[in-house]
């Protein structure tokens, strides 16, 4: 790739190495490096960082790495390596925080409803820790709430998407008139409209639950932290020299 900047290049390499290792070692890599719910036995503190380098499949890593290259490269050229890396990982951490916060609400909402029905917490936690559940729970609190409860506990988050959404927001701030296109909607749209459109889509799918298997609130968290950082930097006119 022509004009590949230093930080973007190394992020690409690390992501690809993690993906290759995942193809070789499979479930063990997901157990160690994905972001699990804090009460899940698989949770470890380092996962708030390592989940950013994990991906579910080839298309997942392909789209994320292309976006990192296409939108991250001009930002790193403008900001420099240190400021770019600070922004990238801050957006990724913001994504992890919001994703975990939403899961905390969903898990405890379902947990409390089941406890109120008379099920003991120790028994309940043992069942879900063993990867099981009781069909009777659906009668008690409804299948949707059971699904949200179990998914929050047992589905790990993977991917650089949260950090990438932060990068997209920064790109829209900086190159607002640049024209971009969606694959399924090949019409040029200015970045200042394109990126909010993506975020609105995640808000819709996240609240309605109509597109499962995607951590929509992680996307929103990365975008939100990206927006807050860009707003703060613009307001305070940070000098690039302090990042050298």
Image (spheres, rainbow, N blue to C red):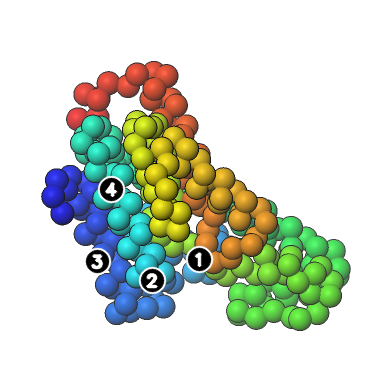
**Which residue is painted at 17% across and 45% down in the image?**
5
Expressed as whole percent of the image width and height from the top left, the position of residue 207 reads: 66, 53
Image disc number at residue 57 = 2
Question: Relative to 201, is 139 above or below?
Answer: below
Q: Are marks 1 and 3 in contact (CB under 8 Å)?
A: no
Label 3 sits on residue: 17
Q: Secondary structure at mark 2?
A: loop
Expressed as whole percent of the image width and height from the top left, the position of residue 85 reads: 29, 42
**Marks 4 and 1, how far apart at CA:** 27 Å
- Which of pointers 3 and 2 indicates the residue nearer the eye? 2
- Which of pointers 4 and 1 indicates the residue nearer the eye? 4
Image disc number at residue 70 = 4
Mark closest to the chain's N terminus, 2 or 4: 2
**Which residue is painted at 42% across and 19% down in the image?**
235
- Quarter where residue 88 is shown: top left
Label 1 sits on residue: 156
């Amino acid at each position: 790739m022509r004009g590949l900047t230093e930080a973007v290049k190394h992020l690409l390499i690390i992501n690809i190495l993690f993906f290759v290792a995942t193809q070789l070692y499979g479930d063990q890599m997901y157990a160690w490096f994905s972001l699990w719910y804090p009460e899940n036995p698989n949770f470890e503190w380092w996962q708030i960082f390592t989940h950013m380098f994990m991906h579910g499949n080839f298309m997942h890593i392909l789209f994320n790495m292309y976006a990192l290259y296409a939108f991250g490269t001009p930002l790193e050229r403008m900001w420099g390596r240190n400021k770019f890396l600070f922004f990238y990982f801050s957006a990724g951490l913001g994504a992890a925080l919001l994703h975990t916060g939403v899961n905390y609400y969903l898990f405890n909402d379902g947990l409390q409803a089941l406890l109120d029905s008379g099920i003991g917490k120790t028994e309940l936690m043992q069942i879900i820790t063993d990867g099981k559940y009781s069909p009777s729970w659906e009668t008690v609190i409804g299948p949707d709430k059971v699904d949200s409860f179990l998914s929050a506990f047992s589905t790990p988050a993977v991917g650089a998407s949260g950090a990438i959404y932060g990068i997209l927001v920064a790109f829209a701030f900086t190159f607002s008139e640049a024209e971009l296109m969606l694959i399924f909607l090949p019409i040029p749209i200015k970045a200042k409209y394109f990126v909010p459109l993506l975020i609105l889509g995640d808000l819709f799918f996240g609240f309605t639950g109509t597109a499962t298997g995607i951590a929509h609130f992680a996307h929103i968290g990365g975008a939100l932290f990206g927006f807050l950082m860009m707003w703060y930097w613009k307001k305070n006119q940070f000098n690039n020299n302090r990042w050298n």
